[in-house]
Image (cartoon, rainbow, N blue to C red):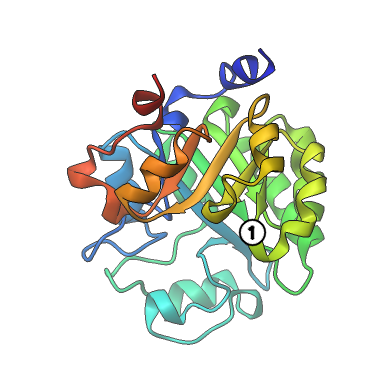
Amino acid sequence: MTKKRFISKIDPRFLNGIAHRGLHNKEFTENGLKAFQNAIDHNVAFEYDIHITKDGKLIVCHDEDLKRTTGKEGIIEDLTADEIRQNYRLFDGGVVPTFEEVVELNHNQVPMVIELKVFRKNYKELCAAFKKSVGLLTEKEKVMLISFDPRALVRVRHLGFVTSFLVAESHFWTYPLKFLFNSIDIEQVLFREKKVVRYSRRHFVNVWTIESTEQLEKVLPYVDTATYQPTLCRHCDIPTCRTRRD
């Protein structure tokens, strides 16, 4: 019953799966505006990562180093937002987007999962910058906040969004901290851990990152939804968690 009440408070499209770093492909670079627009066009929830720049701006990128998505080295936390805008381009030609640009592009059209990426223990600065921009997120049922760093999630859990604690196999010792937050977001190898199975009976569980139909078939009886690599999305007609579990 607790689980059902919690699910009723979030946008049901979360249950249909979450596109990892946007609906990216060979044409659209991950965590770029084109990949996010592609997710919006296909009405699917998407996940993305935010870092804080040297001058306190929020930039969307998975890695702290820009090289993998731009071909040019540069640590986000050591650069200003203007330096990134002027000197870096994603491989698809787009800008490295700011958090504000992603929120404005989406404009509450589809649900979003926002990961707070802590680097060099900068969780205080990162969360302070996020709180300054939190007014942009006007429909809280369409947003989940996630992080591997519990210090970051603790600082934003009072804002009224669903908070989900990321738990990796290599850091499973952090699992007891789960009760500080609304839900957990587990690495897919953990889905059958006894502790996780017990927790999932009454709490919302997401699993990451699903890369094949075989993996999806294995986890769906145990979790509520899954973050998937867009390569699994066959013409964006993904096999949804809700459909499989009904």
Residue reaching furthest bottom?
Answer: 73
Residue reaching furthest left?
Answer: 235
Quarter where residue 70 is shown: bottom left
Quarter where residue 77 is shown: bottom right
Q: Is residue 204 left or right of residue 97?
A: right
Q: Position of residue 82 (x, y in %)?
A: 53, 72
Q: Is residue 1 above or below residue 11?
A: above
Which residue appears at 57% of the width and 25% of the height?
Answer: 141
- Give the camera-side residue of 188 and 60: 188
- Give the camera-side residue of 40 and 213: 213
* Image quarter in which the N terminus is found: top right
Which residue appears at 37% of the width and 62% of the height?
Answer: 30
Q: Is residue 224 above or below residue 103?
A: above
Give the total number of marks visible in the rendering.
1
Q: Position of residue 53 (x, y in %)?
A: 64, 69
Q: Is residue 103 left or right of residue 16?
A: right
Is residue 214 visible from the viewing direction of this image? yes
Which residue appears at 82% of the width and 39% of the height?
Answer: 180
Which residue appears at 57% of the width and 46% of the height?
Answer: 191
Q: Is residue 36 left or right of residue 167?
A: left
Q: Position of residue 109 (x, y in %)?
A: 39, 31
Neighbor class of circle 1 (other Cα within 10 Å; few <14, some 14-19, many 20+) is some
Is residue 88 visible from the viewing direction of this image? no
- Mark 1, secondary structure of its residue: loop
* Image quarter in which the C terminus is found: top left
Tag 1 residue: 168
Q: Position of residue 119 (x, y in %)?
A: 70, 71
Q: Is residue 220 above or below residue 61?
A: above
Three-letter code for the amino acid on which mark 1 is drawn: Ala
